[in-house]
Image (spheres, rainbow, N blue to C red):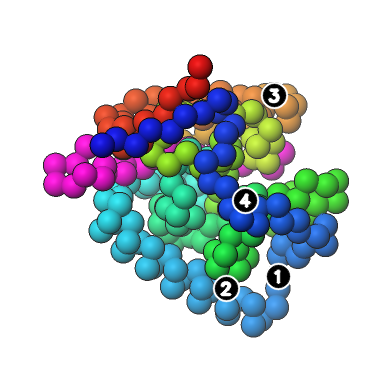
Amino acid sequence: MKRVRYYKEFTDDFSVSRNQDITLPDSYEYVKTGFLFKIWSAIVYGTLVSIAGVYLKLFLHLRFRGKEKFKSVKGGFFIYGNHTQSFGDVFIPALAAMPRRIYTIASQANYGIPVIGKILRPLGALPIIPTLSGMKNLEAAIKTRAESNHPIVIFPEAHVWDYYTGIRPFPDTSFKFPAKLGMPAFCMTATYKKSRFFKRPVIEVVIDGPFYPNGESVKQKASFLHGEIYGAMCEAADRSNCNYIEYRKKD
């Protein structure tokens, strides 16, 4: 029997964790440069991405379409994705961008999740700390990582809706980063196809881009990227032909 979830708004959160009200300090160290941490981070990242890759391909039937497009950009860039896998979205971008190491903008609420919260830093999470100094430090970390040729991953829908086949509306605020840095952006759209052999659908991740900022001001450039990427994601989402979980709006 198909699972059904009911929502009031597109911003509803279906993944509520016990400690999601956790607050990180403004002094959070985004870019740790210690030798021991670098070794620990490399081990955690390499090990977990390898294990997750096997799981995603064998059990979630993951495949990619167009990830060779990332090779067209030599420097840093941004990847925008629809947020439809609670576990998979931690690792799908890493598999798509290999051999480059990714860094992902994340909600600080994720740091309250048992076990996972403890490994987010070595996995490359860049938490949003919604204070003036916190956002300033986040922007500096994004600039440092992107200028070191690393992809920066952003899920502008913010909340996870597992197996959702549409694209939820999102603002253009998260596009200010590539707009300010003058860097290209890609979109990475998870689509869901019926499987001939399994009840769970095949996840086909479609890569589109690169899209380059266009406009006079940062606001215009961010708005342009938003339009290009939202349009491409909606077009890619039309490839889905399987509603593994049905979402219905409450009356």
Q: Quadrant of the N terminus?
A: top left
Q: Residue at image x 31%, y 44%? A: 203
Which of the two marks, 3 or 1, is nearer to us in this view? 1
Is 162 drawn above or below residue 113 in the view shown?
above
Residue under pointer 3: 220
Q: Nearer the viewer, residue 184 or 169?
A: 169
In terms of depth relative to the viewer, which is nearer, 122 or 96?
122
Please name which of the two marks, 4 or 1, marks the residue nearer to the observer: 4
The residue type indicated by label 3 comes to Gln
Query: Where is mark 4, residue-wise?
Result: 106
User: CB atoms at circles 2 and 1 under 8 Å apart?
Assistant: yes
Q: Is residue 182 visible?
A: no
Categorize mark 1 by other alpha carbons within 10 Å: few (<14), some (14-19), many (20+). Answer: few
Instruction: Assign a secondary structure to mark 3.
Output: helix
Q: Earlier in the sequence, mark 3 or mark 4?
A: 4
Determine the residue positioned at 31% across, 32% down.
243
Give neighbour class at mark 4: few <14, some 14-19, many 20+ (Cα, 10 Å): many
In the image, residue 121 above or below residue 164: below
As drawn, the residue found furthest toward the left would be: 196
User: Nearer the observer, disc 2 or disc 4?
Assistant: 4
Q: Please indicate, yes or no, whether residue 129 appears anywhere in the rendered image.
A: yes
Residue 55 horizontal/vertical position (percent): 32, 61
C-alpha span from label 2 to label 3: 37 Å
Q: Which range is magenta?
A: 180-207
Q: Residues within 10 Å of mark 3 (few under 14, many from 20)?
A: some
Q: Is residue 184 magenta?
A: yes
Relative to 161, is 112 on the left or the right?
right
Residue 225 as seen in the image, left or right of residue 59: right
Circle 4 — which element? strand
